Amino acid sequence: MAAGTLENKFIPTWWLPEGHSQTLWRKLSPAKKVAHTRQRIELDDSDYIDLDWTTLDPKQSKDNTIVFLLHGLCGCSRSSYILAMQSLLNDQGISSVAMNFRGCSGEMNRLARAYHSGVSEDVNEVFSKLVAEYPAHNFVFIGYSLGANVLLKWLGEIESHPRIRKAVGVSTPFALESCSQAMLQGVSRLYGQYFVRRLVKDFQNKQEYLETSNPEQATRIAKLGDTRSISSIWEFDDQITAPLHGFEGAEDYYRKCSSSAFLGSIAVDTLLIQSKNDPMIPPKSIPNSEMLSPQVQMQLTEKGGHVGFVSSNPDNWLEQRILNFMQA
């Protein structure tokens, strides 16, 4: 089926009928093979962020467009949803770059600070450098889960930019506190337990690394206390994420960084793709139309899970839907 003819309605493949199966299949299924070229962006605070470009020369990209992708919690540029989108963009002759949040590129970043759901300042700094490097190009942004929240917060802060053509947010945790609480309940607790184990392990590895590479930064981490008793996302955010990044606690962090508060200020054409049976994002956290600016449209599907949206079509619905929106 041609990219421009795919219907917008999502129908899940028959063997992945509900939210958990859609979510897990996207996570566990074989990823597309995409070759990357790495670019390291030195940041003003002496840290860095790694970008992974597809091998298509940006200067040869169709319509002088660069697609900028942001991954989710505990993800990276090799996450399956990133590779699936980059593979399709390659086929279309469109250059793309996936930003690894601090510490997510396979190498430890230099500072104690890491990334979180509201780290829009890092996106802004990297984007500013790319705009200067590619003065003839326009950009399309795609964020997934945590990366979508960061993206929408940033778009609300800057309102518009002449070089940003469109944006897409997939499976966005619009209300961070509500989503954190959801992963304490029912089967969704399994997702919360998975993430907290990953986060605590990554944090412990970071502390060990900094003890030899940057003892001063390691001291900042040590002051946050013992992490072995942390058992939930909320506890991790309250003890680690919030104080490490200048927030008073988890509630302060969630309140200031939830993208729901920024949706009304977005002046870039933006598509939000969300599923009612997302096991990590409760329906009550999904914004109503009154919270959206005129430039933001919501596609709320009955099914699809969390960054799932796997259809029977060999070309997955999610990637095709995003491409259709880009090309409209």
Image: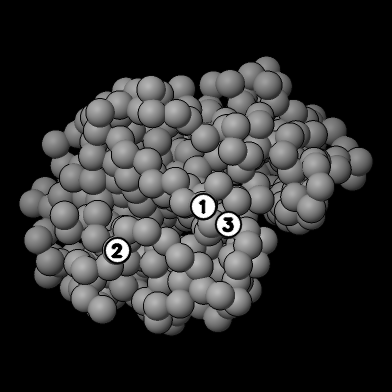
Residue 182 position (above or below residue 69): above
How far apart are labels 3 and 2 at the CA level? 19 Å
Write the residue at 52% across / 35% down. Answer: 286
Residue type for callout 3: Gly
The single residue placed furthest to the right in the displayed view is 229
Q: Nearer the viewer, residue 91 or 297?
A: 297
Given the image, on which type of amino acid does mark 2 rest? Answer: Glu
Q: What residue sits right under mark 3 in the picture?
A: 305
* In this view, 2 is above or below 234: below
Name the residue type under label 1. Glu
Q: Cβ–Cβ below 8 Å for labels 1 and 3? A: no
The image shows residue 218 at horizontal and vertical percentages of: 72, 40
**Whole-percent x and y of residue 298?**
37, 41
Q: Residue at x 32, y 39 (%)?
A: 297
Colour scheme shown: one colour
* Disc 3 and disc 2 in contact, CB within 8 angstroms: no
What residue is shown with label 1?
302
In this rendering, position of residue 82 left or right of residue 87: right
Query: Residue 184 — which label?
Result: none
Task: Report helix, strand or loop for mark 1.
Answer: loop
Q: Quadrant of residue 104?
A: bottom right
149 vs 47, nearest the viewer: 149
Answer with mark 3 or mark 2, whichever residue precedes in sequence.
2
Is label 3 or label 2 in front?
2
Q: How many marks?
A: 3
Q: Which residue is mark 2?
A: 7
Chain-order first, disc 2 or disc 1: 2
Element at label 2: loop
Residue at 60 percent across and 71 percent down: it is 16
Work out whether residue 310 can be spotted: no
Crowd tier of the residue under label 2, counting other residues whose Cα lies within 10 Å: few below 14, some 14–19, many 20 or above: few
Residue positioned 53% across, 59% down in the render: 304
